[in-house]
Image: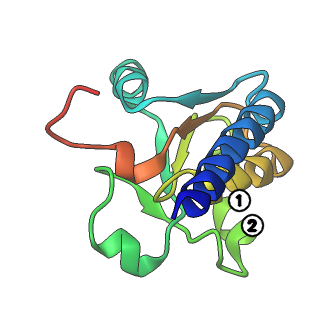
Amino acid sequence: MIWTLVIVAALVAGWHVHEGCWDRRLFTGDCRNLSARQTRAWLREHPETQMLDVRSAREFARGALPGAVNISSGDRNFDTKAATLDKETPVLVYCAGGFRSRKTVERLKVLGFRTIRHLHRGHMSWRPDSRS
């Protein structure tokens, strides 16, 4: 039992180190990683922001940020569909927990999006009735 806990703790610690390195490389220029609280403030200041939910259609149907557009990161036509969004208007991207959307940030940069915001920890961090 103790070895299981040690292994789990090592995996969690390893992920946090990896995530930190990934974030330092990914979130540069006008691309930022925002907490739920920071996201709320951003959306108040930038109501024109396009919200891109990259979860599956099934996940999206269970609940999403108000006004979000759903284009699954797993969709083989993702790039074509995402290219229909305005590249000059800020885009907020999120998934369930932050992994798929982080990968999507890289794709959005390649597609030419200028201002990208990422919801840290994804939809699971978003609580409509909370201030976090």
Task: Specify how the rendered protein is coloured.
Answer: rainbow
Question: Residue 11 in the image: x percent, y percent?
Answer: 67, 53
Does residue 124 appear in the picture of this structure? yes
Q: Which residue is mark 1?
A: 83
Res. 84 in view: no
Q: Are marks 2 and 1 in contact (CB under 8 Å)?
A: yes
Q: Residue at x 38, y 81 (%)?
A: 58
Q: Secondary structure at mark 1?
A: loop
Rendering coords of residue 113 (x, y %): 73, 41
- The vertical placement of 52 against 117, above or below, is below
Q: In which image quadrant can residue 88 be found?
A: top right
Secondary structure, mark 2, is helix
Residue 110, percent from left and from top = 85, 49
Which picture quadrant has residue 72?
bottom right
Residue found 78% across the figure and 39% down from its top:
22
How far apart in space, not on screen, are marks 2 and 1 (Cα)?
6 Å
Q: Viewer-proximal residue, 20 or 90?
A: 20
Name the residue that disc number 2 marks: 79
